[in-house]
Image: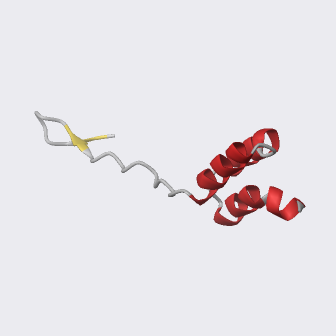
Amino acid sequence: MGAIYLAPTIVAIVRKHREAQVTVLNVLLGWTFIGWVVALVMAVGEKHDAPAARPPQYDIYTGERIR
């Protein structure tokens, strides 16, 4: 029974995705069916990649790259 209750947390840890958020939600609201489902959806949801790196910037007068 405990493994089913903690399923969203286990999934999040295995996927390394929103572990802390899912665990807190699961522990605090997992006893309600809606809280458990929301935690599970968060755990299996799409991982967001890091934002794209900024393109290099260049000085408009000298053409040198700015850090």
Q: Quadrant of the N terminus?
A: bottom right
Q: Is residue 4 above or below residue 55?
A: below
Quarter of the image containing the C terminus?
A: top left
For the point 81% across and 45% down, which residue is it? 31
Residue closest to the far left: 61
Q: Is residue 9 left or right of residue 43?
A: right
Residue 54 horizontal/vertical position (percent): 32, 45
In this view, which residue lies farthest toward the right? 1
* Side of 63 relative to 4 (left or right): left
In this rendering, position of residue 17 left or right of residue 51: right
Q: Quadrant of residue 65?
A: top left
**47 vs 51, nearest the viewer:** 47
Where is residue 5? Give x, y as percent. 82, 56
**How many labels were placed on the picture?**
0
Q: Position of residue 30 (x, y in %)?
A: 77, 46
**Front in this rendered view, residue 41 or 53:** 41
Q: Is residue 5 left or right of residue 17?
A: right
Residue furthest front as drawn: 33
Residue 23 locus on image (x, y percent)? 76, 48
